[in-house]
């Protein structure tokens, strides 16, 4: 990004209130067995700016992380998601779990677990409808500390996914004791199946390893039917990607839930 644009964006982010600058879109996570929506992943987007125009997540998220603003925005996201879960429940009569991406700085904030609990209690949401995703590379940065925080989150009923799995360096001895429920296989591997033999083996091995450890698997970035069929064949539990749906506004999720009911 151009330095000038970055400086400007930094200023905009500092000044603006979450509700005015951001919104969330949601991407369905499909259960392979039933081909129905099992959960959705919440993804942060920025509203177009009158000077800077369209601002992509790979532009603004690194700035939120570098400046620590991600902590505050992170709480806003959890709050917003709780409201949305209730809204879908009112509209569709179903509870749809939402998976939220969490940055390591949020996990390392000593008030994090308590604050999350407060938000969930405030909205009177069952914690099992909130899931957190943390990238493999971040989870393995300070594994001992992270394991302790994840244990507390699991204790209040929040399930954890390891995101972008396969791109970081997991130590198997840590993976074995990580209190996580789902492994999300990174889209860079998924996109090459079933034509790239070594990625086929890699994805199969991750699915089998996850099973041995008692984790469910989610394949990200599924764009084609042949990829889905391969994943179904090898026993992957959930899939997510453009083949089923792009990330979409909440009303579109409502329609999808209606049509699959
Ligand atoms: O870091 P994480 O894995 O949570 O990133 C999710 C990102 O991947 C989102 O920005 C989303 O738009 C993108 N994405 C979701 N599905 C697909 C897909 O099928 N193909 C590609 N190329 N990107 C996807
Ligand atoms: Mn994610």
Image: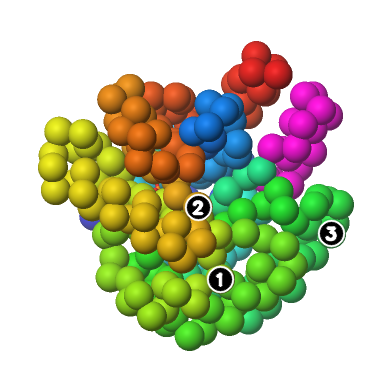
Lateral position of residue 199 relative to residue 252, left or right: left
Quadrant hosting residue 149 = bottom right
Q: Which residue is mark 3?
A: 121
SS of the residue at dot 3? Answer: helix
Q: Label 1 CB, ligand 2: below 8 Å?
A: no
Circle 1 or circle 2, nearest the eye: 2
SS of the residue at dot 2? Answer: strand
Q: Which residue is mark 1?
A: 179
Secondary structure mostly seen in magenta is helix
Q: Is residue 61 visible?
A: no
User: What is the spatial separation of the Cα atoms under label 1 and label 2, in whole angstroms?
Assistant: 12 Å
Residue at coordinates 72% horizontally, 53% vertically from top-left?
128
Q: Where residue 104 sits in the image (x, y, percent)?
A: 47, 70
User: What is the spatial separation of the Cα atoms under label 3 and label 2, in whole angstroms?
Assistant: 27 Å
Q: Which residue is mark 2?
A: 216
SS of the residue at dot 1? Answer: loop
What is the number of callouts on the image? Answer: 3
Q: Quadrant of the C terminus?
A: top right
- Earlier sequence position, callout 3 versus callout 2: 3
Circle 3 or circle 1, nearest the eye: 1
Do residues under tags 3 and 2 come within 8 Å of each other at their CB atoms?
Answer: no
Give the magenta part as a residue range.
80-96
Residue at coordinates 43% horizontally, 63% vertically from top-left?
212
Residue at coordinates 54% horizontally, 65% vertically from top-left?
180
Do residues under tags 3 and 1 come within 8 Å of each other at their CB atoms?
Answer: no
């Amino acid at each position: 990004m151009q330095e000038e644009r970055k400086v400007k964006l930094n200023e905009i982010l500092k000044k603006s209130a979450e509700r005015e600058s951001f919104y969330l879109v949601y991407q369905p996570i499909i259960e392979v067995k039933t081909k129905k929506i099992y959960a959705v992943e919440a993804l942060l987007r920025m509203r177009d700016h009158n000077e800077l125009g369209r601002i992509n997540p790979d532009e603004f998220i690194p700035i939120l992380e570098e400046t620590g603003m991600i902590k505050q925005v992170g709480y806003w996201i959890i709050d917003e998601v709780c409201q949305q879960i209730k809204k879908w429940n009112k509209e569709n009569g179903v509870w749809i779990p939402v998976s939220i991406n969490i940055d390591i700085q949020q996990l390392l904030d000593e008030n994090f677990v308590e604050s999350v609990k407060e938000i969930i209690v405030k909205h009177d949401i069952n914690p099992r409808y909130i899931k957190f995703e943390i990238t493999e590379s971040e989870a393995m940065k300070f594994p001992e500390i992270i394991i302790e925080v994840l244990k507390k989150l699991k204790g209040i009923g929040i399930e954890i996914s390891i995101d972008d799995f396969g791109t970081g360096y997991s130590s198997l001895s840590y993976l074995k004791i990580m209190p996580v429920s789902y492994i999300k296989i990174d889209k860079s591997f998924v996109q090459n199946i079933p034509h790239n033999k070594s990625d086929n083996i890699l994805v199969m091995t991750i699915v089998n390893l996850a099973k041995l450890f008692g984790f469910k698997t989610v394949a990200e970035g599924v764009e084609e039917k042949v990829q889905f069929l391969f994943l179904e064949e090898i026993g992957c539990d959930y899939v997510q990607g453009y083949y089923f749906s792009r990330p979409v506004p909440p009303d579109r999720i409502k329609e999808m839930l209606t049509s699959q009911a």
